[in-house]
Structure formats: C-alpha cells, structure tokens
Image: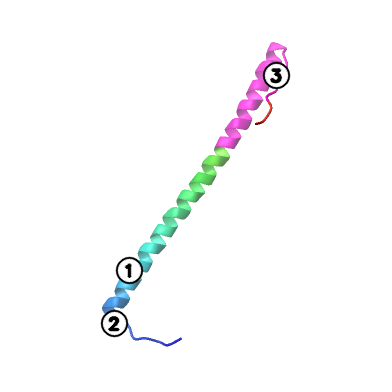
Amino acid sequence: MDVKEMPDRQFEAVLARLDRIAEELARLNRNAENAEGFALVARELRNLNESLNALAYAALGQSPRVRRAK
C-alpha cells in the first residue's frame, strides 16, 4: 500500500468525519440496547399477565381457558 501525503486540512476533515461516525455508532448501539431492554420488559410483563390470569382463575375455582399459540 502506497503512503500518500494528506494535507493537514484534509486530514482534520477526515478525523472530524470519523468522530461523527463514531458518535452515530455509539447512538445506534444505545438505541439497540434500549430496544433489547424493552423487549425483555415486554416479555416479562406478558409472563406476569399470564400468571395473574392463572391466579385469578384459581381464586374463582375455575381452570383457565387454554389458548393455542398461533
């Protein structure tokens, strides 16, 4: 690979662009982590809802209606 001289001004522009790209990647990673966290919370809430439904049916002395997964 040949080494090319890069003027300072162009080098600074490239560095600034790389910094913006790094910031954007960090933002995207945070968003992805938040989305994963929300999915986990949603799954836990769904499980809690199913458990509460089972408890409610048990308190009424009934068995829950089983719904088949689609």
- Given the current orientation, which residue lies at the most extreme front position? 70
- The mark nearer the N terminus, 1 or 3, is 1
Please state the horizontal and vertical placement of residue 15, each as a whole percent of the image. 35, 72
Q: Secondary structure at mark 2?
A: loop
| Residue position marked by numbered label 3 in the rendering | 64
- The mark nearer the N terminus, 2 or 3, is 2
Q: Which residues, given as a range, are shown in magenta? A: 42-67
| Residue position marked by numbered label 1 in the rendering | 16
Amino acid at the residue labelled 2? Pro
Residue closest to the eye, 46 or 5: 5
- Location of residue 5 (image quadrant): bottom left
Please state the horizontal and vertical placement of residue 8, each as a whole percent of the image. 28, 80
Kindly report the distance in space between the C-alpha atoms of the residues bearing marks 2 and 3: 74 Å
Residue 28 lies in the magenta stretch: no
At 65% across and 17% down in the image, what residue appears?
56
Amino acid at the residue labelled 3? Pro
Marks 2 & 3, CB-CB < 8 Å contact = no
Q: Taken as a whole, is the magenta stretch helix, strand or loop?
A: helix
Kindly report the distance in space between the C-alpha atoms of the residues bearing marks 1 and 3: 61 Å
On screen, residue 16 above or below 52: below
Position of 61 with respect to 12 (left or right) is right
Q: Secondary structure at mark 1?
A: helix
Amino acid at the residue labelled 1? Ala
- Location of residue 28 (image quadrant): bottom left
Position of 22 with respect to 68 (left or right) is left
Please state the horizontal and vertical placement of residue 60, each as a whole percent of the image. 68, 11
Marks 1 & 2, CB-CB < 8 Å contact = no
Label 3 crowd bin: few (<14), some (14–19), many (20+), radius 10 Å: few
| Residue position marked by numbered label 2 in the rendering | 7
Position of 67 with respect to 5 (left or right) is right
